[in-house]
Image (cartoon, rainbow, N blue to C red):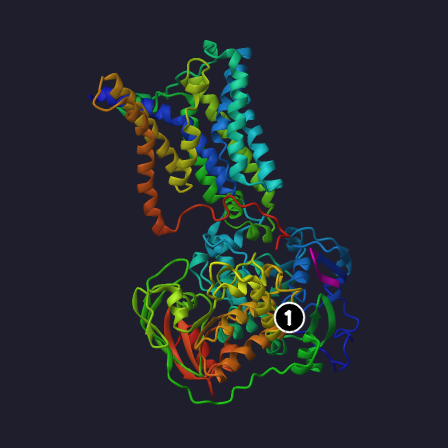
Amino acid sequence: MNDSVLAFTLAAAVAAGTPLALAALGELITERSGILNLGVEGMMLLGAVTTFLVASATGSTALAMLAGAAAGAALALAHAALSISLRANQIVSGLALVIFGTGLSTYLGRPVEGVPLPPGARITRTSVPLLQDLPFLGRVLFQQDLVVYATWVLTALTALYLFRTRPGLALRSVGESPATADAMGLRVNTIRYVHTVIGGVLCGVAGAYLILARVPAWSQAATTNGIGFIAIALVVFASWRPWRALLGAYIFGLALRANFALQAAGVTAIPAEFLAMAPYLLTILVLIALSASDLRHRAGAPEALGLAYAREER
Amino acid sequence: MTPAPDPPATAGVDLHPGGRPVMEARGISKHFPGVVANDHVDLALYAGEVHALLGENGAGKSTLASILAGLYQADAGELRLAGEPVVLRSPREALARGVGMVHQHFRLVRRFTVAENVALGDRSQPLVMSTPDVQRAVVALGERYGLPVRPEAVVGDLTVGEQQRVEIVKTLYRGVDVLLLDEPTSVLTPQETEALFGTVRAMAAEGKAVVFISHKLAEVVAIADRVTVMRDGRVVGSQPVASTSVRELARLMVGRAIDLDVVRPPQRPGEVVLTLDHVTVDHDTRRGSLTDVSLEVAAGEIVGIAGVSGNGQRPLAEVAAGLLAPDHGRVVVGGRDVTGRGPRAARAAGLAYIPEDRLGTGLAPSLTIAENLQLTRPHGPVLDRRRWTADATRLMQEFDIRAPGPATTTSSLSGGNIQKVLLARELDAGPSTIVAAAPTRGLDVGAIDTVRRLLAERRLQGCGILLISEDLDEVVTLADRILVLFEGRLVHTCDAEGADITELGLAMAGAGR
């Protein structure tokens, strides 16, 4: 593999990992508040189909993305209402979201199955001046589209928010010990609602990005392809840390691209099905290795993850 | 402290004639499903006063405090702050108005540092927080009230006593005038309790009203200016401490005169019935560890294990009962080596086990009393339910288990009756050795008395008893010999007769090493 092929593969890996990174960041923020939302796949699919329909109707990229974000938020809000206000089982509610989101997007997407996106609505490459001319790195990182750059900014902001700010501290405390947060005068359920919806927005945007940048025409099967579930696993193995989630997403992207590259090169020794499995396996293995080092530092799941909070329960 | 000129000796007379209470509760009632936790309760708190709220478990003290702190909403009644009626809908509103509570079960985020815990919910902090500012404030408060804490320490790494100091600092940081301390001494060594009293006095001297919730009479008399006694959700007396006595308070609290001492006639111990020989249990985050523990319990003696909770009590009890196989060392029950052979072998060798976790390990919560009583008995292929009922009826009478009948579901009983079911099953098997872990924790005074008497009675009948308890008074009253457990090691041994509480307390805090 020569230098330019490697740069091309890595650049493609970053682009392929971006929707996963966005979804994982969203789920990470939600889980930090103690709410487990397994409905990522559903939110991404609904976000994607909404984006496609709005893009087809208006031709506007921005409007389409907003619509995708809103769709994700709406589903997340349903999950919040069920699991926070009604204190339903979060696993059941999350899985219901997957089924609902998948079903609804199948219904909405059926008339447009196979229809290409209007060319004007596609997200196109925006190279970063100066940085794009860097040897190698320029081609890998800085000849991407705006959403890729925005993902980096978002990761940095999330890390800053979680560990350096007052609302971030409140968010983490609600996920760790809602009774403590409540006793200290924080609005536990409000904080959980807000961050569950933020998580939904990011999952919706992840779905929007898939449609606007990655998949040429609406095809439900080719859209999310299970990465909503990979995003959930990613959050766990990234030990609920934003930069690690981003890294994990790119590793997944790389494995995905390497797989295409190998198939294109006509490698037949390994069955294609095994190559298709590889990205999932590799991502999990790398992140297990990372999280094993965390056991020593007592990092781990927010202690109240998946548990509803009611003040007067005794 | 506010001077109290000639406190009148009659109950119910105001300590502060003319003074206005900083906080008042009037006619507070609170119901939980099936329980009246508070029934028309009145309480007045004055600045600079240490006000004890005394009562047995379940008397409604914590519920009242939770209402004052905005955690629970009263069903009826009114709260007043500085004479003004207020509604405290949440702890947030209570804190904003200067009312803070230190809970019995700490409200701390274990993975956060001390400073992070203190800063939590402080809206005066800038959006991007300034950790050094908070750390300085923590240190300053610590110095002012005698609460040494390291602001950068992670709370989960601290001892229980240190965590309590963090709780208090956290509440003081929010600038409270009324501080509610819910059973603050239940987890402390005698030395830590003494230090806490110093803090409480310093807070009162600064004009704060401190509410000290406790069921320990001696502490109330030692620290409080005024005491309000609760029983069955009602206030049964409120008076200056100077005008009352331990005996009278005990009578008010229980509703009848009780004998506070258990008789322990001296007797010569017989042969050894339980031996732990150099037992080591490697660390396990859930249970804790044991390091090279050796002890012997003889027939007719009670060996008491004192120590602050979480210092290896659980692995010790489980190893002795055969539930946990030690990594090194031997366990011998009634002359038979049962090491690693499971609870069945230990029981066959004559051991009875009263676990601290009554309704998890001890009894099956959803089974009936009769069924639970039969759990350890041998059975044929067809169950003889008629005999079960007869057995249960007899044992319920013998052990004074108050329940509608043998078919009552165990989990619906009160704590005291649950413990009596457990004792009935374990003691009726006629054991030669008893391992009892925290046998009176969380029980009311009446049930505590029953449990202690039953154990003392078995001792006289020649049982060897290993009593593991965090209640130092209990160990001193019941045991013949006392061993102190600290961080999984036995660090101190002495006879209970003439035991030095100070020395025991130091050993419990690890100072004896």
Left or right: B220 in relation to A156: right
Residue B393, given in percent of the width and then of the height, sits at 61, 69
Residue B175 sits in quarter: bottom right
Decide: few, some or many residues near mark 1? Use Cα within 10 Å; few <14, some 14-19, many ≥20.
Answer: many
For image coordinates 42% across by 59% down, the residue present is B157
Please say whether residue B33 is one of the residues in the magenta stretch: yes
Q: Quadrant of the C terminus of chain A?
A: bottom right
For image coordinates 40% across by 75% down, the residue present is B511
Q: Amino acid at mark 1?
A: Glu
Tell me: residue B167, above or below residue B243. Answer: above
One can see residue A62 in this view: no
Q: Which residues are magenta?
A: B32-39
Q: Main secondary structure of the magenta part?
A: strand
Residue B506 sits in quarter: bottom left
Left or right: B334 in relation to B255: left
Residue B286, given in percent of the width and then of the height, sits at 41, 58
**Residue matched to label 1:** B56
Helix, strand or loop status at disc 1: loop
Residue A175, given in percent of the width and then of the height, sits at 51, 46
Tell me: residue A153, above or below residue B75. Answer: above
